[in-house]
Amino acid sequence: MSLPVVSSGAEIARAYDPGLADQFQSARIDEILPQDPEARQTFARSLAFDATLYGTAAVLEYRQLYALAVDRSDPQYVGFNTFSHGRTLAGPGYKPFKTPNADTLYSNAWLDLRNGPVMFEVPDTAGRYFTANFLDVHGNASNISARTHGFSGGRFLIATTDWQGEVPEGTTLFRVTTPFTWILLRVLVQQSGDDVRMAYALQDRFRLHPVGHGAGAVNFPDGRDTSAAGFMRILDFVLRNCGHPKSEEALLHRFRSIGIVGKRTVDEVLTDARMQAGIEQGFTEAQELIRVSMSQNGPRVGGWSEPVDVGRYGFNYLYRAVINTRGTGANVVEENHPFSTFVDADEERLDGSRGDYRLVLSPPPPARFFWSVTVYDSATRELVPNPLARYLISDRTPGLKRGKDGSVAILFSHRLSGRAKGANLLPVPAGPFHVVIRAQGPDAAITNGEWRPPAIQKMPVARTAAK
């Protein structure tokens, strides 16, 4: 019996071509290389710049794959097709990825589907919110979640788009586009000890069982290498093993000249000093472009950016690179509708050393599952260490004060000594920071644009108490 196919996006599924390497090798020669040394360096610089923008999401995800599933010396290692369950909410220094939420427990697994599907068992969560966020190597997202399938659980056969086989009775086929696929599982947890223990037990009931035979050995490049050469080796590996959308063939064909899915390897290309210099220069310039574009992650209203294509990037390679550099694992907006800001109402950079700030949510974000407001250090993209060990304010914050109209006023401050430490106070660093509002399971008022957060107001020096 074959139940309905659930796909990570029909458009993406139809577009991917696992036979990338064979198709590229059909050309008899790579692009010609300029004989003039300076021109050759300029050519390599241009290609490396474009390849870095194109491949940043894939390389960042690969580095997580390498730590979790390949590098046995890494503390995070568990291997393929196995969950690594996080048992504490994310805090400062969280290792798996940047810009984590502090609302849910995370579990991570990397699937290797080269030789067949993996069975994914989802338990009855008894009304507790969860989402299993499936991400291909370029960050395109899909979900098996409380939103998409309810709370009662089920069995899902995870398979690539080219797999052909029988689906067991009582099992739903769920297609993904690349044979290396990341599952980022989130389970909502309250702060109380009893609830945390119940969430642990629930995590353990999400299970993976490989159905196919073990995949053959493959030479994984070093995921710890952050150099330009390391980046290009990783991107070459990903494209050779995971394919590409057919519509990108002309773009990727150009990268052959710097060793990415070409007849010459990256290392062979690097023996030419001019090519090496150009690759390093283009890589550095692209990284800088991504860095200075970090606050531009969607249309802005009142200082807040609202990503509209997160998890579905199309040909927006700079946008994809920016979003994934800020934090891999971004979900589709139907699952999590985020708002983020780096500036106050006067378009001045948020900076805890310059004073306190105030945000009044009237009303708070209308969301089916939960909402939260979280602060991150803009330099590290990590949660901010503070004496209160408080990293967010949410609809579940104990003692949260609300106005008579249901509004919530949040005070952002670095100056904690000598002041009342009420539940509406959110600590910030003594430097640049940014704020993310998450609406998990956004209501129509968010998706249709009726609800938007107001600008964050910088408070006069004399006003230091949250009201």
Image: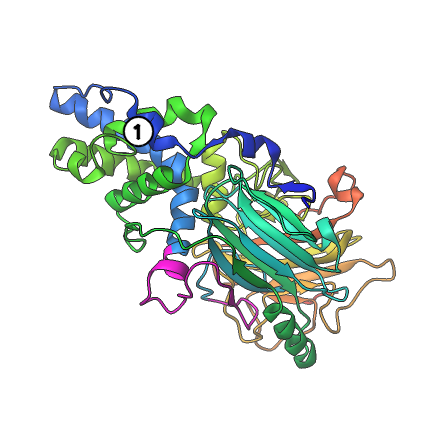
Can you say whether 338 is above or below 95 in the image? above
- Residue at the far right in the pictured view: 404
Q: Is residue 282 left or right of residue 12?
A: left
Q: How is the image coloured?
A: rainbow
Location of residue 12 in the rendering, given as x and y in whole percent from the top left corner = 55, 33
Question: Could you say whether the residue bearing mark 1 is in a helix, strand or loop?
Answer: helix
Is 70 contained in the magenta span?
yes
Q: Is residue 255 left or right of residue 320?
A: left
- Pointer 1 residue: 255
Residue type beneath disc 1:
Phe
Classify mark 1: residues with Cα within 10 Å, few (<14), some (14-19) or many (20+): many
Q: Quadrant of the C terminus?
A: bottom right
Location of residue 142 in the rendering, given as x and y in whole percent from the top left corner = 60, 45
Q: Is residue 14 left or right of residue 437?
A: left
Of residues 271 and 432, which is closer to you in this image?
271
Q: For residue 21, which quarter of the picture?
A: top left
What's the magenta region? 66-92
Location of residue 85 in the rendering, given as x and y in whole percent from the top left corner = 53, 68
Task: Identify the residue at horizontal 30%, vertical 51% (top origin).
Answer: 220
Location of residue 81 in the rendering, given as x and y in whole percent from the top left corner = 48, 59
Q: For residue 267, which quarter of the picture?
A: top left
Q: Is residue 54 visible?
A: yes
